[in-house]
Each structure stands twice: as C-alpha cells, then as structure tokens.
Image (cartoon, helix red, strand yellow):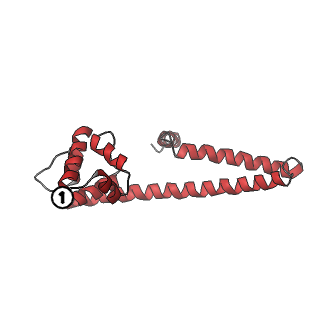
Amino acid sequence: MDLKKTGSFFKQLRNEKGLTQEQLAEHFGVSGRTVSRWETGSNMPDLDVLIEMADFYEVDLRELLDGERKSERMNKELEETVLKVADYSNDEKLRIMRRMHVICWLGVVSFIVYMALEIMGLADSGVTEDIASFCLGLDFGILLVSVLYTSRHMSRIRAFKKKLLGRG
C-alpha cells in the first residue's frame, strides 16, 4: 500500500467536496492536524473512520486503500465483513477502556485511603502502616499497568502471554 498515493487520494476527495481540512476534521471528530497527516501519507485513519470516509465520499473501501478509483463496486458480502471487523475492533477498544476505567478508579480510591491515613498521622504506626504501604504499592502497580496498557508494547506482551499459554 502506497501511503503517499492514498494520502493524495484523500486530499483529492476532500477537494472534490469543496471542504477544508478543518471542516473535514470536524465532520469525522478528529483534529485538522490528523487530517493533514492522512493527506501527506504519514498516518492512516482507523478502520472505522475509513469506513465512514468511504460512505462520506461514496467510494469503495478498496478505492480508499489503493488511492485510486476503481470501476467495479465492492461486493456486499465483503463490505459486511469489513463492517463486522470494524465493530469488533470498536468493541475491543471499549472493553479495554472499561477495564482501564475500573483500574484507574481503584488507584484513586487507594490513593485517597493512603492520603487519609497520612493526614491523620496513622501511616507510620501498626496495622495502618501496613495498609498505607499496601495502598502505595497498589498505586504504583496501577501506574505501571496504565503505562503498559497505553503503550504499543501491550500487543507484544499479549502475544508472549498467548505463546506461553499455548494459544498462539
């Protein structure tokens, strides 16, 4: 896939509609800078945005990806399959975001408990010292998990985990 050619095609389609990059960005809910990156070929839209673009510009998804118009139309079954893949991708992102949301709230509650113990002067004595230490450790662990989840290294970790468990 030639990203420069695809980007030029995106720009051509936008110009045919008579839109600025900012207007297009507003339509798709992204920044103008993102549209600029698409058009220069330095970045590609997510699959769900590509499907929306194909509908918006009234072209096939293949045409968008190839960076040129085709005379034949994408068959309906292929289009439905691509839509299902996009839905699955969105569901997966939503599931991960929900998980991250729960983990982050756990970190917030743990931090509040630690701060309450610290303010009351109980973080350095007896059983409450253990609770305070646990809360700090939990917060640090949640911070590490958050960094991993938001990094591109998470896919490598998942692949390694599948390989270890014999699923990959």
Q: 15 or 93, which lies in front?
A: 15
Residue 62 visible from this viewpoint: no
Q: Quadrant of the C terminus?
A: top left
Using the rendered image of the protein, determine whether residue 33 is visible from the camera's viewpoint: yes
76 or 140, nearer to the observer: 140
Q: Report the quarter where the N terminus lies.
A: top left
Residue type (three-letter) at the residue carrying disc 1 = Asn
Q: Seen from this angle, which residue lies furthest right?
A: 126
- Residue 147 vs 87, above or below: the answer is above
Q: Residues within 10 Å of mark 1 (few under 14, many from 20)?
A: few
The residue wearing badge 1 is 75
Spot occupied by residue 147 in the image (x, y as percentages of width and height): 56, 43
Q: Is residue 127 left or right of residue 77?
A: right
Say which residue appears at 72% left-offset and 45% top-offset: 137
Q: Which residue corresponds to the image point at 77% horizontal and 53% vertical from the top-left?
A: 115
- Circle 1: element type: loop
Side of 139 where 33 appears, left or right: left
Q: Is residue 6 left or right of residue 118?
A: left
Nearer-the-camera pick, 97 or 88: 97
**On screen, residue 146 above or below 106:** above
Q: Position of residue 7 (x, y in %)?
A: 25, 43
Residue 84 screen position, x and y as percent: 33, 59
Q: Position of residue 88 (x, y in %)?
A: 39, 57
Numbered disc total = 1
- Residue visible at 20% across and 61% down in the picture: 76
The answer to which of 160 and 165 lies nearer the viewer is 160
